[in-house]
Amino acid sequence: MVRGLNWLLGLMVLVAAAVSMDSGRIEIEVINGLWQWLRSIDSSAALISGEIRLPRTLLALLVGAAMGLAGAALQGFLRNPLVDPSLIGVSQGAALGAAGVFYFNLLPALGILAMPLAGLIGAALILLALIALSGSMARPAIIIMAGLAISALASALLAVVLNFAPNPYAMQELVFWLLGSVANRGIDYLYLLLPAVILGGLLVWHQRRLLLGLSLGEQVADSLGLQVVRGGRFIILGCAILIGSAVSIAGNVGFVGLVVPHLLRPLVGYRPDRLLLPSALGGALVVCVADILVRSLPPEHELKLGVLTALAGTPFFIWLVWKERQRWI
Amino acid sequence: MDLMTISGLSVMQRLQDIDLSIRAGVVLGLIGPNGAGKSTLLHAIAGLLDSSGQIELDGQPIEQYSAEQRARLIALQPQFLESAWALSVHDIVSMGRLPWADSDQQIIEQAMRRTNVLGFAQRPVNQLSGGERARVWLARVLANQPRVLLVDEPIANLDIHYQQDVMQILRDYAQQGHAVIIALHDLSLAARYCDRLCLLEQTQLVSCGRVDQVLTEKLLQQVFKVEVFIDLAARPPVVLSR
């Protein structure tokens, strides 16, 4: 059943990617354009399909996959279906790093890659703070508390940066970036995001037995010979790489990491280890479809991708709280 | 030959200088008041707590086994268990195979049959009654096929039918050449199903031996601070507070 689900989601991702490549204000022959782009033929079709739509589609897929996978892994590790990847503070850390580049023009030699790289550095610093705070007792309950504290600190620092914005335009630009988008980002961004998603994904994937063992609690996982503390660190590190790289490139694309694993969980028999791949595929599908919707809206009222996912995700979150409340009445 | 030998086992402020040994085929009961150290002893044997002293399994110090090897040889069923997710009974039982890194369906099915949970293998564990769930937890550790099975209060909150059911399953498992160590509060069931008993009080071992050597009025009164009525000759044996 899980294999069938993966194939189905994979097929839907391919269809969404094809629709995304064909979506835009200018009508072009996509396959022809891509073929021309690959052969370096100078044409508008080649430019639009190869330089604009292809990176946008691939970035949407990778950002969504990173968010979905990180959400599934963190929910499994922390044994809590309401955990969102932003809980461990890495998204805020990435935003803080990127904000530094906006305001203080750091790393100018790196050009357009300065911001995502600074985002990754910010995410890494927050991760180090998280590991330092949770210490040798890096167990799920401690991680949640440390994550809340660190994400509050990162949010406060981000507020300080916004407060001391050098000019209103810089602030506006940062706020727009924070709203989340995969538009106007070249193929260069993929060179940063793809290895990060592969590395983070492998770190998480390697710990899937621990995720299953943790279903019955840490004591049982320990008694099954699983390395809860060490494996937990790998999961947190993998998630930080996934979230940090996705946020530093696309800004905040919220709720994907919360909603996608939650929707798919019953379809994999609630097994946290079997939820990883479907969540990555589901996340890729949701973000790609959301980006297609964003592009289909009138250009004079541009809606950012992160705003759309938050608008769609928040009612779902409310429904989850409602459902949980019903259980206690 | 003893399957497991424990000497001078201590856990900071929770367990002091425990010496005991257990042979294959034996059910050893740990009894004593709340806070005596029964659960701590089981957790220390399972390697979940930092402890001093020595544990030998099959004549080899336990430190010589890797965490995975240790988990194959010693399985623990904690007192309080809850699944974070609505996993199926089959999935819960198959978790017993995690230390072996396989999902041997024959062993999993055998464990489910032995505990009589095969009939609802595909049902979510959160939809089962307390008694059914207790047997599912037991099936998980049986699927582990450990040489030493540690069980913490397996019959707490179970009705008398399920109490007998669970204790008989553990007894059968011991008779197949394994060692079973159970922490128990019910002294009558301890007398009925255990071959040997160890009585703990305030983190220390007070007495260890045959059932009739440990379940004496003098010892129980000294440890539990109540007068007791004991009739080990009755079928089943009776141990009650007066």
Image (cartoon, rainbow, N blue to C red):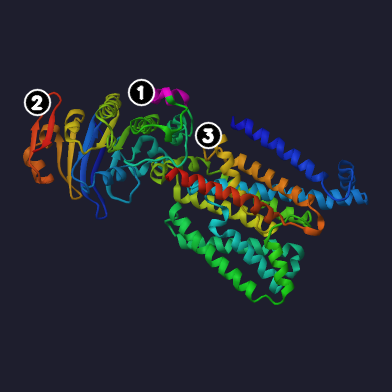
Q: Please state the extent of the stretch shown in magenta in the rendering.
A: B104-119
Query: Mark 3 Cα within 10 Å, few/some/many (few <14, many 20+)?
Result: some
Relative to A44, B26 lies left or right: left
Which comes before the other along the chain, label 2 or label 1?
A: 1
Query: Where does the image place residue A231, in percent across and percent down from the top left?
Result: 49, 48
Distance from Cα at disc 2 to Cα at disc 1: 30 Å
Name the residue carrying label 2: B233
* Picture layout, residue A207 above or below residue B158: below
Name the residue carrying label 1: B114
At label 2, which amino acid type do we have?
Ala
Name the residue carrying label 3: A269
Relative to B200, B92 lies left or right: right
Query: Where does the image place residue B224, in percent across and percent down from the top left?
Result: 13, 45
User: Which of the chains bears the disc numbered 2?
Assistant: B
User: Which of the chains bears the disc numbered 3?
Assistant: A
At label 3, which amino acid type do we have?
Gly
Local secondary structure at mark 2: loop
1 or 3: mark nearer the eye: 3
Distance from Cα at disc 3 to Cα at disc 2: 50 Å
Q: Which mark is residue A209?
A: none
Local secondary structure at mark 1: helix
Q: Nearer the viewer, residue B71 or A92?
A: A92
At label 1, which amino acid type do we have?
Arg
In magenta segment, residue A122:
no
